Amino acid sequence: MKTLEKETNSEQGIKLFTHTVKVRWVDLDENGHVNNGVYQSYFHEARVAAFDETGLSLTELRKRNIGPVILKAELEYKMELKYPETTRLTTRFEAQKGSRVLTIQDLYRESDGALVCSAKFYGLFMDLKRMRPYKVTDEEASKLASTPI
C-alpha cells in the first residue's frame, strides 16, 4: 500500500519525503470522488511516515510523552480524485523556534502526475504529561528540516 523514499532538493537543501496511498472505494462520497475529509487522513498517514523517516518516530516520541498537535489545517483542493487511483504525497517540514513546526504537503495523482490538493498544517510538539508545549531541541529541529532555524 505504501512506499517511502527521501529526496533532498539540492538547490534549497530541503528534505522532501514521498509516500503513496491507494484510494479505496470506501473513501468516495456520493458524487463518486474522494470525500474532502478523507484527504486529511491521507496527509496524516504521509506525515507519520515522514516523521519515522526523519528519526523522530512518533512511537519513540510517545515513549517520552511528547506528541505533535495540529493547531490549524489549510487545504486547497485543485482537482478531483477518484477510485481506482494511487496517490503520491510529498511532505516537508519547516521547524520553527520553540515548539512550532509547519508541515507542507502536496497530493498528486500517480496516473497523470496532476496536483490534486495542497496543504499546510501548523502545529506544535506537546509535552503530554505536563500538557504544555515541548521546546524542540536544535538536534530534533535539524532532523525535520535541513535549512537552519
Image (cartoon, grey):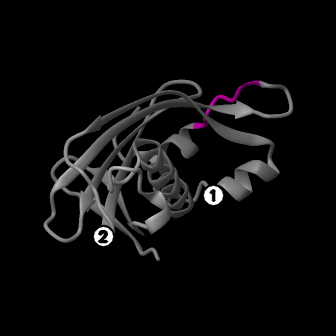
- Residue 128 in sight: yes
Residue identified by numbered label 2: 85
Crowding around mark 2 (Cα neighbors within 10 Å: few <14, some 14 to 19, many 20+) is few
Q: Residue at x 45, y 54 (%)?
A: 42
Residue identified by numbered label 1: 57
Which residue type carries mark 1?
Answer: Ser
Describe residue 140's horizontal placement relative to residue 79 as left or right: right
Single out the mark in the foreground, 2 or 1: 2
Q: Which residues are magenta?
A: 132-137
Image location of residue 48, percent across then percent down: 55, 55
Q: Residue at x 28, y 56 (%)?
A: 81
* Secondary structure category for the residue under label 2: loop
**Image quarter for residue 114?**
bottom left
Q: Earlier in the sequence, mark 2 or mark 1?
A: 1
- Residue 148 in sight: no
**Image quarter for residue 126?**
top right
Image location of residue 110, percent across then percent down: 23, 69
